[in-house]
Image (tube, rainbow, N blue to C red):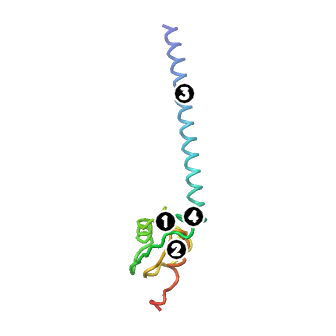
């Protein structure tokens, strides 16, 4: 009996150590993924990239009165002018832009910050 008990303890210890190693590897992998994704998101927030190079494809976008940043972001993503609508929304809030209604001609060579700066300007029609 005592020999069987020792074998059970050894097997239990090996399985316990293996389980801990698996958990540590998974935690390390998730931390690494979280850090790399978080860095990429933060980098894009402060240094946005255009969807395509110059000259880009022109598209006309109409922003309605009272449209929120999230509604504008969805519209821009639908038109293929931005790749990440959450970046656009955070830039709008972080940099304190005001999105004015109107019809804008945008290109895929513009960054989301360029678009927000254009939306922030009061158009002649509104003055």
Mark 1 touches mark 2? (CB < 8 Å): yes
Which residue is depicted at the point 43% across and 76% down?
A: 60
User: Of label 1 and label 2, which has the lower sequence position?
Assistant: 1
Question: Closer to us: mark 1 or mark 3?
Answer: 1
> What residue do we see at 54% from left, 44% from top?
30
- Can you identify the residue that label 1 sits on? 82
* Residue 62 position (above or below residue 80): below
N-terminal label among 4 and 2: 4
Closer to us: 81 or 69: 81
- Give the CA distance from mark 1 to mark 2: 10 Å
Query: Residue, x 44% and y 69% (percent of image)?
Result: 76
Q: Nearer the viewer, residue 7 or 60?
A: 60
Determine crowd level at label 2: few under 14, some 14-19, many 20+ residues with C-alpha closer than 10 A.
some
Q: Which mark is residue 18?
A: 3
- The residues bearing labels 4 and 1 have C-alpha atoms spaced at a distance of 9 Å
* Mark 4, residue position: 49
Circle nearer the N terminus (2, 3): 3
Q: CA distance from mark 4 to mark 2?
A: 12 Å
Residue 89 at x, y percent in the picture: 48, 68
Where is residue 78, by image quadrant?
bottom left
Gap in Å between the C-alphas at discs 4 and 3?
Answer: 44 Å
């Amino acid at each position: 009996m005592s020999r069987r008990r020792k074998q059970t303890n050894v097997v239990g210890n090996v399985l316990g150590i293996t389980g801990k190693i698996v958990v540590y590897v998974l935690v390390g992998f998730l931390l690494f993924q979280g850090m790399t994704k978080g860095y990429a998101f933060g980098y894009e927030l402060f240094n946005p990239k255009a969807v395509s190079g110059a000259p880009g494809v022109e598209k006309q976008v109409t922003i309605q009165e009272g449209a929120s940043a999230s509604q504008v972001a969805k519209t821009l993503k639908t038109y293929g002018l931005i790749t990440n609508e959450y970046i656009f929304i955070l830039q709008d809030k972080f940099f304190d832009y005001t999105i004015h209604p109107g019809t804008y001609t945008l290109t895929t060579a513009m960054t989301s910050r360029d678009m927000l700066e254009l939306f922030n300007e009061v158009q002649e029609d509104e003055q």
